[in-house]
Image: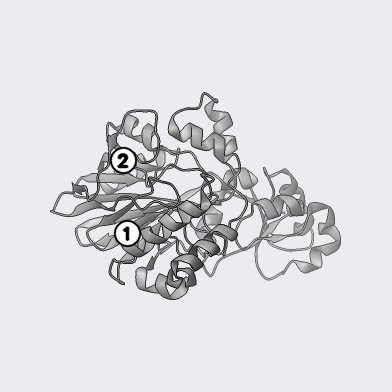
Amino acid sequence: MYRDADAAELAARLGTPDEPLVLDVREPAEFAAWSIPSAVNIPLGELATRASEVPAEREVVTVCATGSRSSSAAEILSRTGRRVANLVGGMAGWAMVYDAVTVELDAVRVVQVRRRGKGCLSYLVGAGDVALVVDPSFDTEVYGRLADEHGWRIARVFDTHLHADHLSGARQLAKATGASLHLNPADTFDFAYEPLGDEDRFGLPGGASFRVAAIPTPGHTRGSTIYVVADRVVLSGDTLFVDSVGRPDLADQAEEFAHSLYHSLHDKVLSLPDDAFVLPGHYGEKVIVRPDRPVGATLGELRQALAPLSFDEDEFVSWATTRTASRPPNYVEIIQANMGRSDVALPILRQLEVGPNRCSVST
């Protein structure tokens, strides 16, 4: 017999000694388009004849789109004596699972919220009884729950840029909590908000500060923004990731934006100290996510790991404009919704954003 497992359990086990073998039984094209990191693909129709390829010493979690094919796969494998779990809800369930990890900075805590199926990262920055939220996803109840757990009231909400791969929850979270909404007017939004200014500072209890460190940091979008927390942590949005940099081509002005991105990185981000800890807005499929540590790296580590950060301007622009991957699915519709210009029903919009993160330059 096999058992059922939910996406939260799977997320908690990935990157640990108890990590199961994730067996995706969808068709190869489905798997190639979007999959769980570390998953192995054997289509359901081939599983009976290829079961010997599945290791017997580890528990296997079978995955498909919604949980139907994977339950059949789990039945096949359980008959061979293997320990098997079926992922309830499949990739649709995986798209909705969140977990969180906390970074302690003296009087300030930064909570990294990971939307595991999208590779989306968002943040609560809190001290005393007040928190600020950066880049919230549309499932705004996640941030309310985490704020309650830490004894915080959400006072301000920010986005790092106009998102193209997922629905922003910033406007909805601000409305639900009574918080003020802060955005960079270099991106276009058709609703009310408080415009950010260069080097704006927002205080937190205990004298800690949260500041807009560099506006603009254009390149991924015109309004791309980074935030610095207590002069020690950089919330880099889609300007700098742990595995790449933000792609410059989504506005169809790739060369212009790539030049802007180069200067944003070198004049703004890389001018910060090497021990500044970078917490990005996304992570790619090759990044290992562990339940007990944030997705992030020091700026010094990223200088060593990411060769493009050492390129001269012409070399960087050539690299950034020729290595971009497929654009995020339905990105035009998602951008329109995040600008406040869409009349598409929310359930349809939620379906449009399902899929992988594609906002970085391919490495």
The quarter holding residue 14 reads: bottom right
The quarter holding residue 285 reads: bottom right
Q: Position of residue 149 (x, y in %)?
A: 31, 46
Q: Amino acid at mark 2?
A: Val
Residue at x-position 50% and y-position 27% = 342
> Which of the numbered marks, if any, corresponds to residue 234?
1
Q: Tell whether 68 sits left or right of 264.
A: right
**Whole-number angstrom distance, CA of label 1 to CA of label 2:** 16 Å
- Badges 1 and 2: C-beta atoms under 8 Å apart? no
The N terminus - image quarter: bottom right
Q: Helix, strand or loop at disc 2?
A: strand
Between 247 and 135, the residue placed more toward the observer is: 247
Residue 70 higher or lower than 54, as above or below? above
Residue 304 higher or lower than 96, as above or below? below
Q: Residue furthest left?
A: 207
Q: How many residues crowd around disc 2 within 10 Å: few (fewer than 14), some, or many (20 or more)? A: many
Q: Helix, strand or loop at disc 1?
A: strand
Between 181 and 6, the residue placed more toward the observer is: 181
Q: Residue furthest right?
A: 49
Residue at x-position 44% and y-position 47% = 221
Residue at x-position 82% and y-position 63% = 50
Between 144 and 213, the residue placed more toward the observer is: 213
For label 2, the residue is: 157
Q: How many residues crowd around disc 1 within 10 Å: few (fewer than 14), some, or many (20 or more)? A: many
Between 337 and 277, the residue placed more toward the observer is: 337
Q: Amino acid at mark 1?
A: Val
